[in-house]
Amino acid sequence: MNNTNPPLGGRRIPLDYGRVAYLILAGLLAGILSNTAIADRVQPDNTKTQFATLMSVPPEIDGVINTDEWASANGATGNWRISYNANQTNGVRGGMLIFGPDLTDATDLGCQIYAGYDADNLYLAVRVTDSMLFDDSIAAETGNGKIEEDDSVELYLDPMNDNATAYTPGSIGGRYAVTINNAYAESHSGTYGTEKTWYARAMRNDTESGYDAEFRISLKSLSDPKFGDVMGFTVVVNDDDDAGPVEKTIDRQVAWVGTPNAPSTYGNLILGHKAYSAALVAQAPIVNGKIDAGEYAAARDIPINPATGQAQTSAGIDTWPPGTFEAMAWVVHDDNAVYVAVNVTDSHVVTDTAEAGSEDGTTWEDDSVEIFFDADLDKNRGGPTLDFEGQYVLTANGAYRDNEARNPTFGETGDWFAATTVTPSGYQIEFKVNKSALLSPTNGTVMGFNIALNNDDGAGRIAQLSWNGDPHQEYTYGELTLGLETPVELKITLWQRNTDGSFTLEWVGGGILQTASDLQGPWSDVPTAKSPYTLTPTAQLQFFRIKR
C-alpha cells in the first residue's frame, strides 16, 4: 500500500467537519459562533468547491495546454468547465454571467479549467472556446494596462481564505491576468516573470476558435499553503467581441463563481483533496437500507451538496434549488468489511430505467448512489487495475452494478451487498464491501475513495454530484483511512460565567484551546489548558476555539 505522506511537509488533515469549535467571550457576554461562518484555511465556505491535484512533473508555461503535461491536474477529464446550455440561466452551465449578452451556442464562449500543484508552485490553466478573438486594446507583452478590454483570463486568489468584501492593496494573492497577446496585470499579485512570483502565457489555437492560458504562481507568495488548506479562488473570462470604437469596453464577462476583486464571493480551492477517517466499530451495521443513527454514531458526517462537492458538468446541470438534491453520508468499518451509508435528499425519486434487482444495467440513468475504491492507492488516470476495486452502484429501487469493479459477487454472503429504502425526503442506501475484495486492508490503511450521486428527473440523468473527484478517475478521488479507534466528536459542552468574573470552559473530543484578539487570528495556544478550564478574559473582546 502506498501511504506516503504528502509533499510540502504537511500532515494529512481530514477535511471533515467539526474539527474546530469556537467560543467568543466579549465582556460579560459568552456565545457560540457556528464554524461554518469562520473564514480560514481549515473550513471551506458555503460556495462552490474544487481542488488542485499533485503533479509529479511541472507543466511548461508556454501558452499551450499539452494534454500529457496536464494529465494529472484536476480538470483534465473535462468535468470542470463553463459551457453553453440552453436550459441554464443566461445559457451558462458550470459558471455564471457577470454581465453582457447571454451565450448563444457552444462556440460563443466557454472554458475548461485545470488545477495542480507541486512542492513549489500552484499551476492553473484555462482552455477558452471563443468564436471571435480580439487583442486591439493593449499592446502585446505589456504590463498593467486594461487587459480586461481584450479577450483574456483573470484568476483571483484569496490565499488565507479571509473573505474580505473587497481586495485590499498590499494583501497577498489578488488578481493574476493575461490576454491572448500576453499583456498581463500584476498590480495585485507580486512580480511577473519566468523566475518571479508568478508567470503566465497565452496562445491562440490554430483554428482561431479559442486560446489557451497557463499560469504558475509561487506557493511561497501565497503564504505557503499546505496539503488540505482551503484558499478562496475563481476564474473570470473576459470576452471582447468587436474590433471596437476608440473607447474600449468589456463586452462580456463570465466567471466560475463570484465577482472580481470580491474575495467573500469566491469559491473554494483545496490544495490536495478531502480525507475521511472511517470509525472502527465493534458492532457491524445491519445492511437493510435503513440508516440507524446508533449504528453510525461513531462516524463523522460527509456532506455532499453543491457547495461541498463537485457537480459533474459533463454529465448534466450544476445548479439546482437548495434541498432538492444532496446527501449526507457516513463510513465505518469492522474486522471484515467497510460500510457506507448515504441518506439522499431528492425531491423527485425516479427509477424508470434499470429494473429493480437487475445487475449491470444503466443504473446511472436512475436515481442512484455510486461508491468508488482505489484500494491500492495508485491514483490511476482512469479506473481500476485490480479485481474488485472500482465502482459499486445501487439505485433507489435496488438495481445494482459492479461491472466496473470486475464483477465481484453480490449478495448478503457475497463480496459486497447493498440495500435501499424510500424516505419522505428521498431515499437511503447502505453498502457493505468485504475487506477481502479490497486487498484485505489492515487498520490504518489509506485508500482512494469517492461517492457520487445521480439524479434522474424522469427523462434520464440530469445531474451527477461527487464528494471528491470524477467517477472512474482514481487520481481525483479523496482518501479514506480505516481508523484505528473510534473518534470522539469535538464540541464545547459548557461555557459559563462564574461569580468572580471568570469563565469555565468544558469540551469533549480532545483538542487544543487557542485564543486570539481577532476572529481572523492569529491564534495562539493556551499552554497546559485541559477541560474543564477556568479563565479570566484579558481584553474587552476575546476569542477562544478548540482545535484538533
Image (cartoon, rainbow, N blue to C red):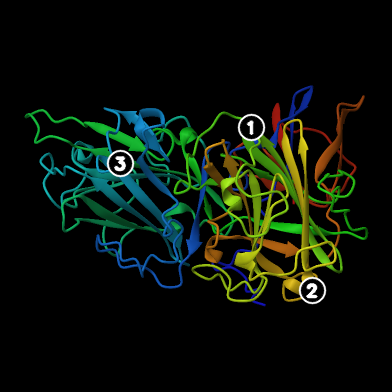
Total number of numbered discs in the rendering: 3
Q: Is residue 204 visible?
A: yes
Amino acid type, mark 3: Val
- Identify the image quadrant of residue 64: bottom left
- Identify the image quadrant of residue 60: bottom left
Residue at (77% x, 35% y) in the render: 423
Residue at (69% x, 55% y) in the render: 358
Q: Which residue is mark 2?
A: 442
Q: In the figure, 310 relative to 278: above or below?
A: above
Which residue is farthest top? 28
Going from N to C along the chain, the mark reached first, 3 or 1, is 3
**SS state under label 2:** loop
Amino acid type, mark 2: Thr
Instruction: Name the foreground residue: 291 vs 535.
Output: 291
Going from N to C along the chain, the mark reached first, 2 or 1, is 1
How much space separates mark 2 and mark 3, taking CA atoms?
Answer: 47 Å
Residue at (58% x, 40% y) in the render: 456
Q: Is residue 359 left or right of residue 161?
A: right
Crowding around mark 1 (Cα neighbors within 10 Å: few <14, some 14 to 19, many 20+) is some
**SS state under label 1:** loop
Q: Position of residue 25 (x, y in %)?
A: 75, 29
Q: Which residue is mark 3?
A: 237
Going from N to C along the chain, the mark reached first, 2 or 3, is 3
**SS state under label 3:** strand
How much space separates mark 3 and mark 1, taking CA atoms?
Answer: 35 Å
Q: Position of residue 498 (x, y in %)?
A: 91, 27
Q: Which residue is mark 1?
A: 348
Q: Position of residue 454 (x, y in %)?
A: 59, 46
Instruction: Name the foreground residue: 457 vs 507.
Output: 457
